[in-house]
Amino acid sequence: MALRMSTLFLRTLREDPADAELPGHKLLVRAGYVRRVAPGIYTWLPLGMKVLAKVEGIIREEMEQIGSQEVRFPALLPREPYDLTGRWNEYGPNLFRLQDRKDADLLLGPTHEEMFALAVRDAYSSYKDLPLSLFQIQNKYRDEARPRAGILRGREFIMKDSYSFDIDQAGLQKSYDSHREAYIRIFQRLGFEYVIVQADSGAMGGSASEEFLAVSPHGEDTFVRDESGYAANVEAVVVPQAAEVEVTAGPAHVEDTPDTPTIETLVAALNAKHPRDDGRAWTAADTLKNVIVMLEHPDGVREPLAIGLPGDRDVDPKRLEVKVQPAEVVPFEEKDFAANPSLAKGYIGPGVLGADNASGIRYLLDPSVARGSAWVTGADEHGRHVIDLVHGRDFEADGTIQAANIREGDLSPSGHGTLSLARGIEMGHIFQLGTKYAEALGLKVLDENGKLVTVTMGSYGVGVTRAVGVIAEDNVDDIGLIWPREVAPADVHVVATGKDESVFLQADEIVHGLEAQGLEVLYDDRRKVSPGVKFKDSELIGVPTILVLGRGLADGVVELKDRRSGERREVAVGDAVAEVL
Ligand code: ATP
Ligand code: MG
Ligand code: MG
Ligand code: MG
């Protein structure tokens, strides 16, 4: 049935909503697709529901295509399973926790590994039952710190999540690969430019976890790529140490000598011992980014002298002397850095920890990104300053490293050329979970030999509401949205203009003709609205093809307008249906 604008629950807005930042978000609100209820919480209006249904439909089709079966778990969940996996606590403030009238703890599901694992545990007992893949399309709840850009980062949002269950790693790999293929088809059909990036720092070429990022300047994720096809979320990049050099050209025994190893010394050593593959000589800039230098202390202890912070470039090389401190590696939890300022001289090396005494913030550098280069602001016990790690620039309060630590032009871990940086929005995430959840929840089956084995799982997510947001951001111009046909709220927008009732009668017929061909029609049949308003609305709403019926009907012609190109042409009434097809 055509959506008739005369009765459609829709009020378009001429003004941008005050709370919207991005163009697509503004237009989704103005054109009446969604409406904000509270930060990160949105109502979907009739036009929005149409688009959402299209996106869900594509995802559902592709999931069914790989043999995944649809289920739906509740969003309101008991605490116990999340205690068993540790996530009741680990999830932190992002988890919505609540209590029922008997004071029992409940949560609103942020993702459903636990529930799927339990359901399979309760139903299945043999390897013969596997493999299995289940999916759902359902609301998720996360109390995001910065619900942002409307539906891109909601606190209530729709996710397609699926889970695979296999008897062994080979099976998991197969399930993972078929999900990967399905995701490629989904994101191609949704029509946006995307990259598949490594999402964790597993072995090179490994694919234990990958993300599908929509390439977008509005993205919150930063990814790197090189010319060889390697791509990774910066969170997952291990920038290679180009070489490990022992400084013999300069003083290796720092405390023995009045001299200090200068950057020039290090570069010279590097060029002498580890010429670059590409034939170019190492420069101080390369050295600063990609080299670990080993230093040997008088007592024979060797340790890496790391250089690599962005700030190093501005630093007097002589200060390298100050950096040569024994590494003090202690478990993150065990030290109170605020009470031990001397630790703030902190050194270095993957997995290093330290503190920003000024702010009292403690942090642990993720080994995968620290690449042996971390310094903490503040004085050491000799009153010397060491190089700053700047809170907010280099790391966040929760210890996350900022993309600033990886730079355009860093050597690629693939060994092919250098890295370039771009921004993306995480649209999908596929993940070989392994046995972690199955172990915690006792999901085991009997194998061929009658032995109990733990099932191995994969988990796979697509942001459904986020996808609508990304498509909107990607498909706008100054006057409105421009939906790709496959996700548009209708195939064609029929605009009947004028006061003459016969126009509406002919329009009714054309609408029927279009529908008879299986097309979905948005029909502006409003009698008391001016043509100007109707045209503005049609441009704002963004159905890709607009069919205007008006004065021309007397001469047997209608106007066909392509929303994206703006191209208009007249076609004979009798050809209108065929032209739209
Ligand atoms: P992000 O890095 O953007 O916070 P995530 O890594 O926390 O996402 P996952 O747990 O991997 O997200 O969830 C699977 C998918 O769900 C994501 O790839 C994304 O498309 C979507 N998603 C996650 N959080 C949100 C949100 N707050 N609003 C809308 N979609 C989301
Ligand atoms: Mg998140
Ligand atoms: Mg993420
Ligand atoms: Mg993710």
Image (spheres, rainbow, N blue to C red):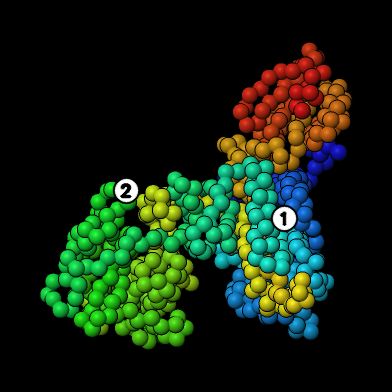
Residue 389 as seen in the image, left or right of residue 255: right
Q: Residue visible at 38% across and 50% down?
A: 418
Earlier residue among tags 1 and 2: 1
Secondary element type, mark 1? strand
Characterize the local packing of mark 2: few (<14), some (14-19) or many (20 or more) Cα atoms within 10 angstroms: few
Residue 575 as seen in the image, left or right of residue 304: right
Q: Residue visible at 72% across and 21% down?
A: 559
Q: Nearer the viewer, residue 350 or 167?
A: 167
Q: Amino acid at mark 2?
A: Asp
Q: Quadrant of residue 313?
A: bottom left
Q: Residue visible at 45% across and 86% down?
A: 334
Q: Nearer the viewer, residue 175 or 63?
A: 175
Badge 1 is on which residue? Answer: 43
* Distance Cα–Cα, label 1 vs label 2: 56 Å
258 in relation to 555, above or below: below
Q: In the displayed image of the protein, which residue is found farthest to the front?
A: 449
Q: Position of residue 192 (x, y in %)?
A: 60, 43
Residue 57 as seen in the image, left or right of residue 278: right
Q: In the displayed image of the protein, which residue is found farthest to the left?
A: 258
Q: Quadrant of residue 262?
A: bottom left
Labels 1 & 2 near each other (Cβ < 8 A): no
Q: In the displayed image of the protein, which residue is found farthest to the top?
A: 555
Q: Amino acid at mark 1?
A: Thr
Badge 2 is on which residue? Answer: 278
Residue 301 as seen in the image, left or right of residue 255: right
Q: Quadrant of the C terminus?
A: top right
Q: Position of residue 78 (x, y in %)?
A: 75, 77
Q: Position of residue 326 (x, y in %)?
A: 29, 80
Q: Is mark 1 within 8 Å of ligand 1?
A: no
Q: Residue visible at 24% across and 76% down?
A: 296
Characterize the local packing of mark 1: few (<14), some (14-19) or many (20 or more) Cα atoms within 10 angstroms: few
In this rendering, does residue 117 appear at all?
yes
